[in-house]
Amino acid sequence: MNVETTKLEILQMLLNIKELSVLQKVKELFETQSKEDWWEGIAAHEQVEVYQGLKDLEQEELVPHDEVMKIFKK
């Protein structure tokens, strides 16, 4: 199942909802999700890793993709 198919299925479900309370809850869900910052949703150690990656990028301390793939294929 792909994203577009899922969207169409959800749209069809929304069109068939008759209860206002259910629609209000769906609306609240969308409003809450759009306000959340993905950064706040990740763990502190993941934030540290992102900052480290940005620092490495700035200092051009990079590892070629093929070398990384060799490490993870083991």
Image (spheres, helix red, strand yellow):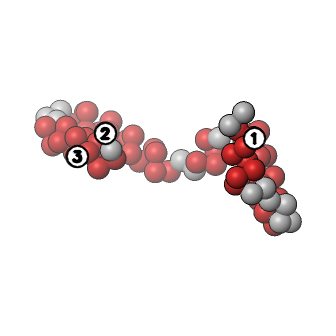
25 with respect to 14 (left or right): right
Q: Nearer the viewer, residue 71 or 5?
A: 71
Q: Nearer the viewer, residue 15 or 66?
A: 66
In front: mark 1 or mark 3? 1
Residue corresponding to mark 3: 8
Which mark, by number, is residue 13?
none
Q: Which amino acid does label 3 sit on?
A: Leu
Q: Which of marks 1 and 3 is nearer the N terminus?
A: 3
Q: Position of residue 52 (x, y in %)?
A: 81, 52
Q: Which image quadrant: the N terminus?
A: top left
In front: mark 2 or mark 3? 2
Residue corresponding to mark 1: 71
Q: How crowded is mark 1: few (under 14 residues within 10 Å), some or many (20 or more)?
A: few
The answer for how far apart the CA atoms under marks 1 and 3 are is 40 Å
Q: Which of 45 and 65 is in front in this view?
A: 65
Which mark, by number, is residue 1?
2
Query: Can see residue 55?
Result: no
Q: Earlier in the sequence, mark 2 or mark 3?
A: 2
Q: Where is residue 66 in the image (x, y as percent from the top left)?
A: 70, 52
Mark 3 secondary-structure assignment: helix
Q: How crowded is mark 3: few (under 14 residues within 10 Å), some or many (20 or more)?
A: few
37 with respect to 46 (left or right): left
Q: Which amino acid does label 1 sit on?
A: Ile
In front: mark 2 or mark 1? 1
Q: Quadrant of residue 10?
A: top left
Q: What residue type is labelled 2?
A: Met
Q: Is residue 43 above or below residue 57?
A: above
The residue positioned 77% from the left and 46% from the top of the image is 49
69 with respect to 33 (left or right): right
44 with respect to 3 (left or right): right
Q: Position of residue 74 (x, y in %)?
A: 72, 33
The residue positioned 37% from the left and 41% from the top of the image is 28
